[in-house]
Amino acid sequence: MNQAPSDLLSRCRSLKSLKSVHARLLVDCSIFSSELVLNKILRSCSRFGALDYACKIFAAIPRPNAFLWTALIHGHVDNHRYEKALILFRQMRRESVQPLNFTLSSVLKALARQTRLHEGEAVLGLIFKCGFHSDLTVQNSVLDLLSRCGQVDIARRVFDGMQDRDVVSWNSIISGYVSNSELDIARELFDRMPERNVVSCTTMICGCVKFGNMADAQAIFDSMPVRDLASWNVMLSGYVDTGDITAALRVFEAMPSSNIGSWNLIISGLCKAGQLESAREFFNRMPKRNVASWTMMVDGYVRNGDVTNARYLFDQMPEKNLVSWSTMIDGYAKNGWPHLAITLFEQYEEQGIELDETLTLIVILACSQLGARDKAEAIVQKYVRPLHFSNVQLITSLIDMYAKCGSIDKALQVFEKAYRKDLLCYSTMIAAFANHGMGQDAISLFDEMQRVNIKPDGVTFLGVLSACNHGGLVVEGRKFFKLMIEDFCIQPSERHYACMVDLLGRAGCLDEAYNLIRSMPMEPHAGVWGALLAACRIHSNVDLAEVAAGQLFTIEPDNSGSYVLLSNIYAAARRWNDVARVRAMLREHRVKKNRGSSWIEFGSVVHEFVMGDISHLDSDKIYFILDLLVEDMKLSGYSIDKQKVLRSPTNPLPSLISYDIMEDG
C-alpha cells in the first residue's frame, strides 16, 4: 500500500503532477497511512518551491514527528526562506518535539546564511544537551556558522578537535579562511587535504581570484579532474575582474556549457574594456536574457558616453527594475544631459517602484547640474527622511545641490543637521561658501574643521583658495597656498595654480601670477593660461596677454574663447590691425565660436536657450523684455562698449554675450 504512493511520488516532475498524486492519496485515504509518504510529499513540495502548499499539508497532520518537522524546516532553508525556517523551529520546540541532527544542521545553516552568531550560540547549547556535539553533520554546520560569522579562529579549534573529518569539514574551514582573507592558511590546509572535490578546488580558486592571483587560480583549475559550471564561472569572473579580457574570452569559448551568469560575465568584461561592439554581438547571441543582461549593456553604452544607444536598449527592455532605471538616469546626469535625467525620473515615478538612496543621489546630482531648485526641493520633501541625515554622502550631495541652486542658507541648514561630518562634507560646504562669494565664512569653516581634528586635503584647500579668489582676499590666498605646501605637504595641482593665478591676476599682480606659472613643476594647462589671459583683459596688459594667448593657441587651437579674449584686449588698446589678424586666424584655422547656452527653471519647468535662439514658444516676448532691459540700462547711465566686441565672420551682428556694459561718467 505504501509502495505504490511512493512510486507515484517518485515519478512527479512538476507541482501539477504532485498535486494530482496528493489528491489521489486524499481520495483513497492512504495519505496518512505512512509518515514516509508524508515526508516524501513535503520534500517534493520543497523541490518545486511550493512551500506554502507544504505548510498547508503539514498543518493537516495530527501529530507530526521530528522527521516531518525536519523535512519542512529543511525545505524552507533550501529555498532561502531562512526566517520562516527559524520560526518553524521555535514552534517545533514549543511542541516539545526533540530535534534530530539534521534539524539542527538545517537551523545552523539558516543562521549562518544570516550571520546570526548570537542565536547560533544558543543552538550550540542545545546541541550539547541533545548529545549531537560529536555528530559529523552537526559539527560541519557549526564550522560553517562560525566561519561565515568571522569567527574563524574558534572554527579552527572546533576543526582541530574533531575526531572524524570528511571533505565537507575541510571545505568549511578552508572557506572560512578564504572569506576572512587568510589565503596562506587556506592554501596550507588545501594542500593537506586527504581528498578533494569540485567544491574544494572552486573554494580555493575563489580565494586566488579574490586577491587577483590568477596564475595560482589557473594552476588549480587546470589540475581539477572534474569541473562544474561554478568553477568555470569563477575563473571567468576572475579574468573579468582583473581586466584580462583575452583570457576571459578564452575561458568562455572553452566552457562546455554556460548559463545566463556566464554570458553576463563576458558581456560585463567586454563593456569594462570598452569593446562595445563585441559586447553587443555577445548580447545578441544570448540564448536567454534577464534584466541584468540588458542593464549591463545599457551601462556599457553609458560609460562610453553613448547615451543614444543606451536609451534605445533601455526602451527595448521587456522588464525594468530599480537598477536599470538608476543606470539610465545616472547616464544622462553624468553625460551632461541633466534635463533628460529629470524627465526620465518623472517617468520612473509613474512606475510606482520604490526609490532607494542611490537613485535619490543621482537625481540630486541632476538637479545640481540644472540648478533646478523647485524640482530639487520637491524631491527632498518627498524622499529625504530624517534618518537619511546619517548618510554623509547624501548630506554632501544635498549641500552641493542647494548651493548650486543658489540657496546657500538651505545648504548651511543641511550641513548643520548632519549627524556626523567628514572631510568631504566640510570641503563641500567650504566650496559652497566660496562659490557664493562668502570668503570669510569659508575661512571660518576651514578653521572649525581643523579644531575638530579633520585634516584638510587638496580639495579642501582648493575650496579655500577659491573663496579667497572670489572675495579678492589676496593676502589670505597667499597664506593658505603656503600653508598647504609647507604645513600639510600637499603638492599643488594645476587647479590650485589656476586659482592662485586668477586671484593674483584679478588683483593686478600680473607679474607675480606669471612668475608663479613659470615656477610650476608641471606643464601649465589651459585653465592656468586662461586665468592669466582673463586678468590681462581686466588690466589691459597686452604684452602678457600675447604670451598667454600664444600658449592657449597651442594647447587648445579650436577654443574660440582665447581668440575672443585676445581680440577684445587688442580692441581696447585700439590695435585694429591685430584685431583683424586674430579674425584671420579664426578663418584660417576654421575655428567656430561656441554658442552660448543657458537655462532657467520657472514653474518647475527647465527652459534651455542658446545664443540667437528663436525656437522657444515665447521667444517674441523674451526678446521684447530684453529690449526693454537694454533701454532701461541706457536710461540708468550704462552704455555698450562696442569696441570690445568680436563680430563673427559669418554673423555681422555682435554676440550679446560679448558686450561690455560700461557705466557712464
Image (cartoon, rainbow, N blue to C red):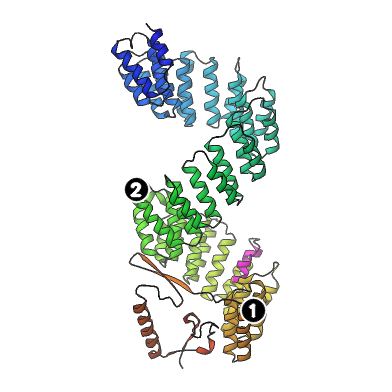
Q: Closer to the camera, 419 or 248?
A: 248
Label 2 residue SS: loop
Q: What is the quadrant of residue 12 in the picture?
A: top left
Given the image, on which type of amino acid does mark 2 rest? Gly
The crowd level at tag 2 (other Cα within 10 Å; few <14, some 14-19, many 20+) is few
The crowd level at tag 1 (other Cα within 10 Å; few <14, some 14-19, many 20+) is many
Q: Is residue 255 visible?
A: yes
Label 1 residue SS: helix
Extreme-bottom residue of the structure: 665
Q: Give the range drawn in magenta.
A: 483-498
Given the image, on which type of amino acid does mark 1 rest? Ala
Residue 602's spot in the image, x, y percent? 35, 68
Which residue in the protein does label 1 denote?
A: 549
Which residue in the protein does label 2 denote?
A: 352
The answer to if 492 sits in the magenta stretch is yes
Residue 4's spot in the image, x, y percent? 39, 9
Question: Considering only vertical position in the picture, is 260 above or below 54?
Answer: below
Instruction: Give the residue drawn at x 30%, y 14%.
Output: 26
Q: What is the quadrant of residue 514 in the picture?
A: bottom right
Q: Nearer the viewer, mark 1 or mark 2?
A: 2
Instruction: Give the residue drawn at x 48%, y 20%.
Output: 105
